[in-house]
Amino acid sequence: MRDTNCDYIARWWYDANIPFNDSRSPYYEPMFDAISVVGKGFKGPTMHELRGSLLIKNVLSIDEYLKDFKISWEKIECSIMSDGWNDQRNRTIIKFLIFFPQGTMFLKLVDASDRMKYAHLLFQLLDEVVEEVGVANVYRHK
């Protein structure tokens, strides 16, 4: 039975083009345990549930989990990091992350195409991100 189940999982995995590394997710094995408890006839969540109510529920759960980390940014030193690239439409995209003692977290993605001509506009964008996330202990280069 395990071989048959693994074949079905593998076919779906390959069809969905999921990276192999994702099988290391801490949610991978518990998913199978939860399905096995229900037994035969279990129907997975629909596309509408995945992109609707389940997505909203999980985003709220993650926001709640991150609340304490966000509060700590007001008291501890953090680093704002960025990475930029041009997308297929030649827009300049900048990704902002925050590094703090508990780890690194994604903050936001910005289309900065209109700000690339002038360095002071890029610093202004960084100041906006710092202000938005409420980081107190940040070195600002002027």
Image (cartoon, rainbow, N blue to C red):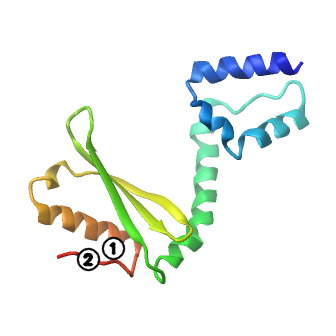
Q: Tell me the mark number nearer the camera, choosing from 1 and 2.
A: 2
Helix or strand or loop: what does disc 1 sit on?
Answer: helix
Q: Position of residue 55 (x, y in %)?
A: 59, 45
Q: Does 136 sit left or right of 32 as displayed?
A: left
> Looking at the picture, which amino acid does disc 1 mark?
Glu
Report the front residue among 132 and 28: 28
Report the front residue among 52 and 141: 141
> Looking at the picture, which amino acid does disc 2 mark?
Arg
Query: Would you place residue 58 above or below residue 50 in this image?
Result: below
Q: Residue furthest left?
A: 117
Query: Would you place residue 71 above or below residue 46 in this image?
Result: below
- What is the quadrant of the C terminus in the image? bottom left
Query: Would you place residue 8 above or below residue 107 in this image?
Result: above
Q: How many marks?
A: 2
Tell me what residue is drawn at x 22 percent, y 33 percent: 89
Q: Position of residue 14 (x, y in %)?
A: 61, 20
Q: Does 98 sit left or right of 26 as displayed?
A: left
Q: Does 59 sit left or right of 106 as displayed?
A: right
Q: Residues within 10 Å of mark 2 (few under 14, many from 20)?
A: few
Q: Badges 1 and 2: C-beta atoms under 8 Å apart?
A: no
Query: Would you place residue 70 above or below residue 29 in this image?
Result: below
Which numbered circle lies on residue 131? Answer: 1
Q: Determine the CA span between mark 1 and mark 2.
A: 12 Å
> Which residue has dot 2 on it?
140
Q: Position of residue 22 (x, y in %)?
A: 62, 37
